[in-house]
Image: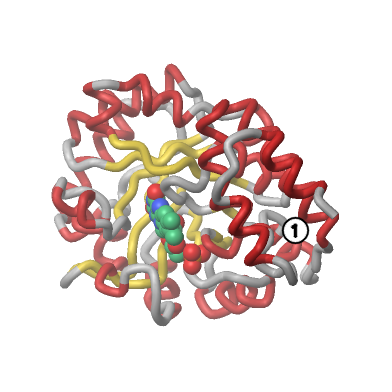
Amino acid sequence: MALAPMAGVTDSAFRQMAKEGGADVVYSEMASVAALVHNSGKTLEMLKAAPRERPYVVQLFGADPKHFAIAARLVEEKIGPDGLDINFGCPVKKVQKQGAGAVLMENLDLSRKVVESVLANTALPVSVKCRTAVGRVKVKEFLEKIADLDVEAVMIHGRAMSQGHSGEIDTEAIKNARQSFKGLVLANGGVRSWEDAYDLLEKTGADGVGVARGALGRPWIFSEIREKETFIKNKEEIFALIREQARLAEATAGRQGIIELRKHLCWYVAGLPDASELRRQFVLIKTLEDIEAIIKAP
Ligand SMILES: Cc1cc2nc3c(=O)[nH]c(=O)nc-3n(C[C@H](O)[C@H](O)[C@H](O)COP(=O)(O)O)c2cc1C
């Protein structure tokens, strides 16, 4: 069970919450290899992780194999994660324009060169994350192109690039891909409950699942999957989790960590009766004390 990468979301504090919530492995936000090459300070800061996050995978995105080579060495040396993942799935326009993410998957030769470049420049396990299809390229073909390389795992988002982040999950495509890949296969897309996870595993024959949005405000979803049980948290339990993530956010990212936390707090309270009033207050918080004042109020 993996916490799938989410830019702007899977920061160190949230990864620690997901680990505590039962995730076996957590992925960083995607990190630009061009940024790592030209001005690495801010990106390396973003990628720092706490020991309790292990196993921790850093995800890289870009399009230039030379950049991937330098970035892989740099991240291994300065961050020391347990694995490196390459993004072949991001559909965002800004990433597309660089020829990176999902559009890179459509260029099979360049995709292979990128994977080779990372493998040649790290001793860490290497994985890829891709789509079921980008344009005319299907996931099976993509995995066949890199089948002889030492890629340990693939997380397949069960949607074509054209679907973005919504719509039906193509379980058949993941199932077919399973047969063309010797490493671990993680199926991803649409897991919002433990029942969804087993349904996806059964339909795809995958070795595990990647959960992204299903973990927002519910980092314990991984324990639910493990225990095959739904855990409904009451207000006190939710507030305890909020306090814990806030403490971690401040410890790892200071004031900016608290600002980044606002969206997480809104997700945490989504199921509570006074959610809209709490959200109205959470979007304005700047300090730990602001959070405490809201959750202490009668
Ligand atoms: C806000 C957001 C940010 C994302 N950022 C990344 C990213 O940095 N790298 C990546 O490979 N996928 C990214 N994704 C895609 C997710 O990892 C996942 O593949 C997708 O959301 C489908 O899974 P889900 O239905 O469990 O959310 C992002 C998705 C969301 C919603």
Q: Which amino acid, by three-letter code, is at mark 1?
A: Ser
Q: For the N terminus, give its image quadrant.
A: bottom right
Image quadrant of ligand 1?
bottom left
Image side of residue 262 versus residue 70, left or right: right
**Residue toward you, 128 or 163:** 163
Q: Is residue 199 visible?
A: yes
Image side of residue 27 versus residue 282, left or right: left
User: For residue 68, which quarter of the picture?
Assistant: top left
Name the residue: 41% across, 47% down: 7
Position above or below: 186 against 49: below
Q: Is residue 155 visible?
A: no
Give how far across and how far down residue 122 sits, in percent.
37, 27
Colour mode of the rendering: secondary structure
Give how far across and how far down residue 298 sits, in percent.
85, 55
Give how far across and how far down residue 63 sits, in percent.
19, 42
Position above or below: 275 against 81: below
Name the residue: 27% across, 57% down: 92
Which residue is denoted by mark 1 in the rendering? 223
Image side of residue 230 versus residue 62, left or right: right
**Residue toward you, 178 or 83:** 83
Name the residue: 30% across, 42% down: 61
Secondary structure at badge 1 equals helix
**Residue toward you, 97 or 275:** 275
User: For residue 230, which quarter of the picture?
Assistant: bottom right
Name the residue: 68% across, 34% down: 288
